[in-house]
Image (tube, rainbow, N blue to C red):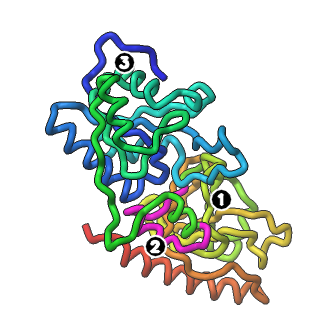
Amino acid sequence: MREKATATPRRIAVVGMFDGVHAGHRHLLSQLKEEGQKIGLSPMAITFSNHPLELIAPEKAPELLTSPGRKRRLIEELGVECEMIPFDERLRTTTAAGFLRTLREHYGVEALVMGFNNRFGHAAPRDFNEYRRLGEICGVNVVPATEYAPDGRKISSTEIRRLIAEGDVATAASLLGRPYTIEGIVEEGKQLGRTIGFPTANLRPADPRQLIPKGGVYATSALGYPAMTNIGSRPTVDTAGTPTIETHIIGMDADLYGKPLAIAFHRRLRDERRFPSIEALRFQLAADRAAAMEAYKSDTPPT
């Protein structure tokens, strides 16, 4: 955590992993801002650069929905200051009272909004009233947040991970409030797609911990263009079978090698499969391109 500042702003905070910054998280951050406006405190989200399970039980640590950098940007775009800290051994052994004192002394936190199922601190209390009592001792007013469950469906990062792992990126997008996105750097590939009229950008994810959707062909978008993305081994043209994330950006053929690229997943079109000939593959890719353009048109609001 940062060193104690000489002139720390008066803040209201919320603490959590915020992986995905999904619709439930944004509901919580909206409440944070509203509470802050009522009592004249600046909103801050305190989150972690690594999942706590990476330290506590690495074998159980989930793949991430957002890289730390993207998570910070998504939170700050909502008008909330974001403080990102590593979940390390010192933090793991800090009690709830100790953590509340740190929030008060180092960050100027005078109020804390707690999500309905949020817990923190070593041997964390299970009762909200206990957090409130500890907060009073430390000079932090602990405020409960309301649960967000539109149409009776609870939104969680765990559920979104399950959907993406199964390839259901369309339902995942409805819970995220936006398409699932992978950011990374374009690497030079074998340029096999170019030889059949479908040049592709081969993406290396910026964070190797990020969850990759189930293999197959997806309607995606990139750089403001419709696109189609193949996740898998390209069995018709690449006998080596090396897994890749390859995107054909429709209507753009610029040199992207070495440049950053973000791919937004709109819907899954089909499984990856081997075709009997290059001509059969080209015919299917043309159909995929038409489907991807239609998905982009329906998912992109008119300007």
Name the spot of residue 75 as percent of width and height, x first: 37, 44
Give the x, y percent position of residue 297. Answer: 37, 76
Question: Amino acid under label 3?
Answer: Glu
Whole-number angstrom distance, CA of label 1 to CA of label 3: 47 Å
Residue 180 drawn in magenta: yes
Mark 2 neighbour density, 10 Å: few (under 14) some (14–19) many (20 or more): some
Q: Do the numbered discs 3 and 2 sit on residues whose CB atoms are within 8 Å?
A: no
User: Which badge, 1 or 3, is on the more N-terminal residue?
Assistant: 3
Classify mark 1: helix, strand or loop.
Answer: strand
Residue 300 on the magenta segment: no
Circles 1 and 3 in contact, beta carbons < 8 Å: no
Determine which quarter of the picture holds residue 245: bottom right
- Residue positioned 38% across, 37% down in the render: 130
Q: Is residue 25 above or below residue 278?
A: above
Name the mark on residue 171.
Answer: 2
Q: Label 1 amino acid?
A: Asn
Q: Which residue is mark 1?
A: 202
| Residue 20 at least partly seen | yes
